Image: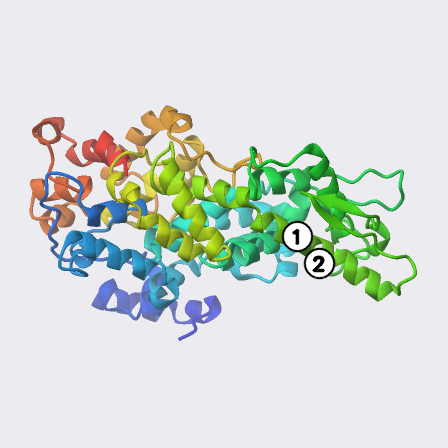
Amino acid sequence: MQLSRRNFLKVGGSSAAWLAAVGCDRLPRELRALYESPKRSGSFQPPTTQDIDPVTHVLNRTAFGPRPGEYTRVRKLGTTPMEAAAAYVEQQLNPQQLDDAEAEYAVRRFETLTEPLGELFEYQEELLQNELMRGALTRAIWSERQLYEVMVQFWSDHFNIDPSKGDCKWLKVADDREVIRKHALGSFPEMLRASALSPAMLWYLDGRVNRRGNMAEKPNENYARELLELHSLGVHGGYTQTDVMEVARCLTGWTVRSKAQEPYFQIGKVEFKLSQHDCGGKQVLGENFPAIPANLDKARREQLGQAELDRVLEIVTNHPATARHLSTKLCQRFIADEPPARAAESVASAFTQSGGDIPTTLRALFATSEFREARGNKIKRPFNYIVSALRATGASTDAGMELIGYLQRMGHAPFNYPTPDGFPEPAAPWLGTLLWRWNFALALSENRINGTRLDFAALLSNAGGDAGLMAHLLGRKPSPDEAQAYYDSGAGLALILSAPAFQRC
């Protein structure tokens, strides 16, 4: 069923009466998504162990935390907690097989996220930015493809773009859709190429002005430097300043049509201009690039010029330093702020042998003993903390700007990081957000956030009482001190959501 806004308005009065008569839970999914966020209900069995078990571990680490009842559902996937956790991870590594219709309906309200690139320029940049942020929050809260959304966040940081720069205000929406979301659990080489030729990335790192029309003109090195330092080899990857300069020369001539560029059509289109490409011989990381002969016809010279980008990307993708750099970052995200060397080596080997296949690489990471044993040792970043709280409490939400405001105060609103390295992963930069976390937990528990609401009485009943609720939120039985603080506080839900154990994953 396709329901446009215009048709919805036509039937608004009658559907509102129907809603009052039958209640949201009996509405068709297409209408239910327009009235409220997806929600789950019913009694559930919280964890019963003293420590975090493998099921809770994967729900905290490969997802944004469990919803009410999710622990029980996942536990049934295997005869032991370890088997169940492994089965859940395998499901998540195949997101296309998971029905995500509820989340997709919830995110449909953000219409700009699906607009063609050229039409994005018809919208105000503030609207685009707000819908980008709200869409990311909505998907993280409601998606069944949790690992996929976690990897979307990971790659958004890895290929960070600040939308405040130039045409990025409009182009980042397409970059998020066509680069990050399209390849988040796909092939790293394909994602790297998509990023290199992304209109937003060409704007952000000045690739659009990287040209050498004559020998006196100096190529722009910004993208070349970040390609090597951040996107592939890493800061200690063994490249030199000469390699940066040579990569910049290889990438000259690529540009993107600007909003302010006459004749004002096909805005955002990426083009290669042979007249701005350095056709001389080059050497990148020990690999020679022969000069493009001047006596060839223009089409052939353009073909050879464009091919230099693909060869550069092939060289850096296959470089051992790239496997080490990416595996270290992945282990930092999923295992520990100080990534264990043995696990990183295993993950790097899987990356290399698979040709940069992301699911294969992650499968190797989740199979390490280091991943299995590193439980409750990482501080949730603010985005992850807020999403996990909303999921754990079963709150309904429109992912409105008041929620985004909390993220902004904590310094972790999506698509708001100004430098190419993206939001930091380790705990230290986020320790100053603890007061705002408490403020958020209290406001959430008291239903003081516009557009967001939880039913505490139902949550408490479905969890089987206070002890069950604490076990659900903590992922294990509460300690005597935690239970005593819960009962003594007079604001037990807010206290547990602010507890160190909940703030860790």
Q: Is residue 398 left or right of residue 267?
A: left
Closer to the chain start, of discs 1 and 2, is 1
- Secondary structure of the residue carrying tag 2 is loop
Pinpoint residue 297: horizontal percent, then vertical percent: 89, 65
Pinpoint residue 371: horizontal percent, then vertical percent: 30, 43
Marks 1 and 2 sit apart, C-alpha to C-alpha, by 7 Å
Name the quadrant containing residue 467. Answer: top left
Please tell me whether residue 261 is drawn above or below residue 101 in the rendered image. Answer: above
Please tell me whether residue 91 is drawn above or below residue 494 in the rendered image. Answer: below
Check disc 2: other Cα within 10 Å, few if <14, some if 14-19, many if 20+. Answer: some
Which amino acid does the dot numbered 2 rest on? Lys
Write down the residue under mark 1: 199
Labelled disc at residue 383: none
Viewport quadrant of the C terminus: top left
Tell how many labels: 2
Name the quadrant containing residue 469. Answer: top left
- Viewer-nearest residue: 19 or 330: 330
Which amino acid does the dot numbered 1 rest on? Pro
Residue at image point 34% right, 54% down: 146
- Viewer-nearest residue: 235 or 395: 235
> Do callouts 1 and 2 mark residues in contact (Cβ within 8 Å)?
yes
Pinpoint residue 178: horizontal percent, then vertical percent: 55, 58
Name the quadrant containing residue 21. Answer: bottom left
Question: In this rendering, does residue 403 appear at all?
Answer: no
Q: Is residue 127 left or right of residue 38?
A: right
Write down the residue under mark 2: 269
**Residue ranking furthest to the right:** 295
Viewport quadrant of the N terminus: bottom left
Residue at image point 25% right, 63% down: 24
